Image: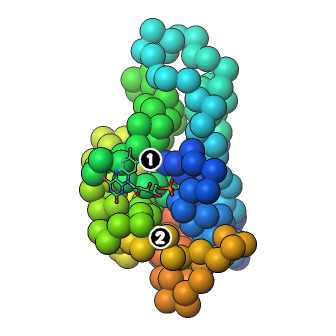
């Protein structure tokens, strides 16, 4: 029986009715056995300021500690202006510093982008991956998860409406679980 792996789910939208948050909640609900997913909030974080590296604000320190304590990270984010929303980049920067003491380092990751638009946040997905390379986070390559058409994706309770989206979500989570085990073995 493989050990339980903890996964921080970081959502790149602060909007109350966020499609990405709904997707993150749906992924938490279908997590395969052996994965324990928890949404780690980023809306309370102050702007990153390098002057604070020696004595960071309490909310930033708590966020970094939370990330340091998990086995893996799942990013579920919208695309803003073909890139990563500022709130998400801010959270990534906060837990990455001081230099050499990043909380992200070595943790396996996966990226899903969700958008009402047709190209499913492709630009944000790949801009985020650029940061994850620098942060030394081995990131799931396949299946790629650019989820378009989000406006018609969730029912009133927030559940996924279409069987094909559910099937894809299951496949994505199974691949991520396998990826986490693979990277743990390789470490
Ligand atoms: C500042 C801003 C920039 C946006 N830029 C893009 C974009 O580049 N690509 C895209 O597909 N959608 C873009 N959108 C639309 C978002 O995909 C849409 O608002 C989506 O619902 C945001 O995700 P959420 O529902 O999780 O909050 C943008 C929205 C905002 C507010």
Mark 1 within 8 Å of ligand 1, using the beta carbon: no
Q: Is residue 12 above or below residue 176?
A: above
Q: Can see residue 8?
A: no
Q: Residue at x 51, y 64 (%)?
A: 180
Q: Is residue 23 above or below residue 134?
A: below
**Frontmost residue, 117 versus 38:** 117
Q: Residue furthest bottom?
A: 163
Local crowd size for mark 1, using a 10 Å CA cut-off: few (<14), some (14–19), many (≥20): some
Q: Quadrant of residue 34?
A: bottom right
Q: Is residue 43 left or right of residue 51?
A: right
Q: Position of residue 159 (x, y in %)?
A: 66, 75
Q: CA distance from mark 1 to mark 2?
A: 31 Å
- First in sequence: mark 1 vs mark 2: 1
Q: Residue at x 57, y 48 (%)?
A: 15
Q: Residue at x 29, y 69 (%)?
A: 119
**Frontmost residue, 59 versus 79:** 79
- In the rendered image, which residue does mark 2 sit on? 150
Local crowd size for mark 2, using a 10 Å CA cut-off: few (<14), some (14–19), many (≥20): some
Q: Can see residue 125?
A: yes
Q: Position of residue 126 (x, y in %)?
A: 28, 55
Disc 2 secondary structure class: helix
Q: Residue at x 38, y 59 (%)?
A: 139
Q: Which mark is residue 106?
A: 1
Location of the N terminus (image quadrant): bottom right
Disc 1 secondary structure class: loop
Q: Quadrant of residue 19?
A: bottom right
Location of the C terminus (image quadrant): bottom left
Mark 2 within 8 Å of ligand 1, using the beta carbon: yes
């Amino acid at each position: 029986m493989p050990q339980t792996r903890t996964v921080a789910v970081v959502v790149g939208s602060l909007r109350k009715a966020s499609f990405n948050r709904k997707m993150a909640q749906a992924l938490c609900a279908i997590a395969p056995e052996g994965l324990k997913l928890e949404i780690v909030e980023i809306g309370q974080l102050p702007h990153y300021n390098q002057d604070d590296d020696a004595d960071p604000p309490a909310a930033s320190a708590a966020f970094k500690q939370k990330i340091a304590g998990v086995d893996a990270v799942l990013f579920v984010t919208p695309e803003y202006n073909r890139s990563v929303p500022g709130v998400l980049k801010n959270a990534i920067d906060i837990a990455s510093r001081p230099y050499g003491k990043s909380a992200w380092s070595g943790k396996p990751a996966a990226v899903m982008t969700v958008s009402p638009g047709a190209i499913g946040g492709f630009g944000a997905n790949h801009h985020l991956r650029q940061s994850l390379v620098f942060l030394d986070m081995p990131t799931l390559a396949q299946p790629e998860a650019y989820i378009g058409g989000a406006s018609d994706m969730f029912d009133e309770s927030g559940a996924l409406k279409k069987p094909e989206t559910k099937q894809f979500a299951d496949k994505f989570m199974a691949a991520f679980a396998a990826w986490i085990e693979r990277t743990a073995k390789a470490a």
